[in-house]
Amino acid sequence: MNGQDRTTGDLKWTGSVVDLVFGSNSQLRALAEVYACSDAQTAFVHAFVAAWNKVMNLDRFDLK
């Protein structure tokens, strides 16, 4: 996807379909903005580990 200046026709932006999805979906955009901050690495790691642990434990059939 290319964005052009309307008056000059020059190329101003280039993006993919994924960029459009994150830009148009407010919930995905909010999450992307939170985890894209320079000080969010620790929060991302903790959230990722918690989600990974939950998925891996739910996949186990021998834990009942």
Image: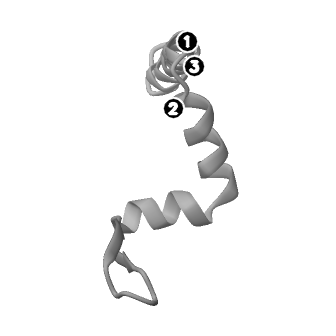
Tell me, yes or no, whether the two marked residues, 1 and 3, touch with CB atoms within 8 Å: yes
Which amino acid, by three-letter code, is at mark 3? Ala
Viewer-proximal residue, 32 or 56? Answer: 32
Above or below: residue 1 compared with residue 33: below
Viewer-proximal residue, 23 or 55? Answer: 23
Taking the spot 57% from the left edge, 19% from the top edge, the residue there is 47
Where residue 22 appears, as percent x and y from the top left, is 52, 57
Give me the C-alpha separation between circle 1 and circle 3: 4 Å
Residue designated by label 3: 47
| Label 3 element class | helix
Viewer-proximal residue, 30 or 56? Answer: 30
Q: Name the outermost residue toward the front.
A: 8
Residue designated by label 1: 46
Above or below: residue 30 compared with residue 23: above
Name the quarter where the N terminus is drawn.
bottom left
Would residue 25 appear left or right of 9 to someone viewing this image? right
Residue designated by label 2: 36
| Label 2 element class | helix
- How many residues crowd mark 2 within 10 Å: few (<14), some (14–19), many (20+)? few
Where residue 17 appears, as percent x and y from the top left, is 37, 68
Mark count: 3
Q: Mark 3 or mark 2, which is nearer to you?
A: 2
Name the quarter where the C terminus is drawn.
top right
Which amino acid, by three-letter code, is at mark 1? His
- How many residues crowd mark 1 within 10 Å: few (<14), some (14–19), many (20+)? few
- Which mark, residue 54? none
Where residue 24 appears, as percent x and y from the top left, is 60, 66
| Label 1 element class | helix
Give me the C-alpha separation between circle 1 and circle 2: 15 Å
Name which of mark 1 and mark 2 comes first in the sequence: 2
